[in-house]
Image (spheres, rainbow, N blue to C red):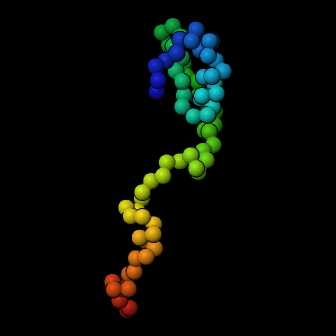
Amino acid sequence: MTKPLTATELRANLYRVLDEVAATGVPREIKRGDRILLILPATPPQRKLEDLPKREVLGCPIDELIETSWEEHWQPD
């Protein structure tokens, strides 16, 4: 999390902070006296598939996997 905002900083940037929390789902801490308060969404933001990072799960390009033949390793029962 980022550094807690003071109440004065929150007041000056209220709509920006609310939009940021709503878009990212990341809570924001607000320092009020000696207490820390949180602004967080009641429901998590909807993520789009195209926004997710692409990961190389298989360890090889998909074209190489498609062209792989298991015939030499396969033995019928």
Point out residue 73 in the picture as x, y percentages from the top left corner.
33, 83
Point out residue 50 in the picture as x, y percentages from the top left corner.
58, 50
- Look at 48% across and 52% down and name the residue there: 54
Point out residue 32 in the picture as x, y percentages from the top left corner.
53, 10
- Look at 52% across and 21% down and name the residue there: 29
- Look at 47% across and 23% down and name the residue there: 2
In terms of image quadrants, where is residue 71?
bottom left
67 or 49: nearer the viewer: 67
In the image, farthest residue toward the bottom:
77
Is 16 positioned to the left or the right of 27 in the image? right
In terms of image quadrants, where is residue 61?
bottom left
In terms of image quadrants, where is residue 11?
top right
28 or 70: nearer the viewer: 70
In the image, farthest residue toward the left:
73
Q: How many marks?
A: 0
In the image, farthest residue toward the right:
15
Point out residue 68 in the picture as x, y percentages from the top left corner.
40, 76
- Please, is residue 9 above or below residue 21 in the view? above
- Look at 38% across and 64% down and name the residue there: 60
- Please, is residue 50 above or below residue 62 in the view? above
**Image quadrant for the C terminus?**
bottom left
